[in-house]
Amino acid sequence: FFHFILRKTLSKYHLQSVALFPAAKSQLKNMASTTSVNSTPTSAPKAASAPLPKPIIFATSGLGGMIGWVIVHPFNTIAVRMNLASMQGKHFSVANAIKDNGVMSLYDGLAAGVWRQV
């Protein structure tokens, strides 16, 4: 029953994105051909791969958090500066901030955010 729902969902919503990945498309075709409403798959499922070691999970999680913070930090800096300017009754412009202080000023304080992810 769950294979039927999964097959219908994939074919309805993800068929266009699956076309980008030939391996996924062939797996979807195999699943559709071996599964029906009242039957079980004809081939046995593959054995689960071994879980990743804990240090690898820890390292990739930390790295993902750091990369995410590098992307988010400039937007957070702009939001904080806008809030501070509005509290002081001043007008804030991103273009003026970049012109006055440079683009790298948007990354001021990045080290604290990155270290927080470690």
Image (cartoon, rainbow, N blue to C red):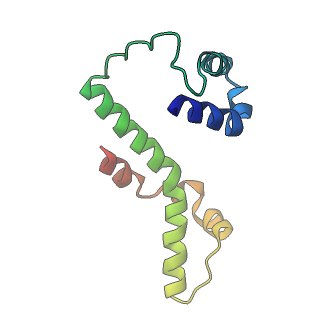
Left or right: residue 34 versus residue 72 is right
Residue at the outermost front position: 38
Residue 65: x, y in percent?
Answer: 40, 44
**At 45% from the left edge and 58% from the top edge, which residue is drawn?**
108
Residue 92: x, y in percent?
Answer: 61, 77
Foreground of the two, 88 or 101: 88
Is residue 72 depicted above or below 79 in this figure?
Answer: above
Residue 29: x, y in percent?
Answer: 67, 18
**At 31% from the left edge and 23% from the top edge, which residue is drawn?**
52
**At 29% from the left edge and 34% from the top edge, which residue is drawn?**
58
Is residue 71 depicted above or below 102 in this figure?
Answer: above
Left or right: residue 63 versus residue 86 is left
**At 37% from the left edge and 53% from the top edge, which residue is drawn?**
113
Q: Quadrant of the C terminus?
A: top left
Task: Say which quarter of the image contains residue 91.
Answer: bottom right
Left or right: residue 109 versus residue 7 is left
Is residue 100 depicted above or below 88 in this figure?
Answer: above
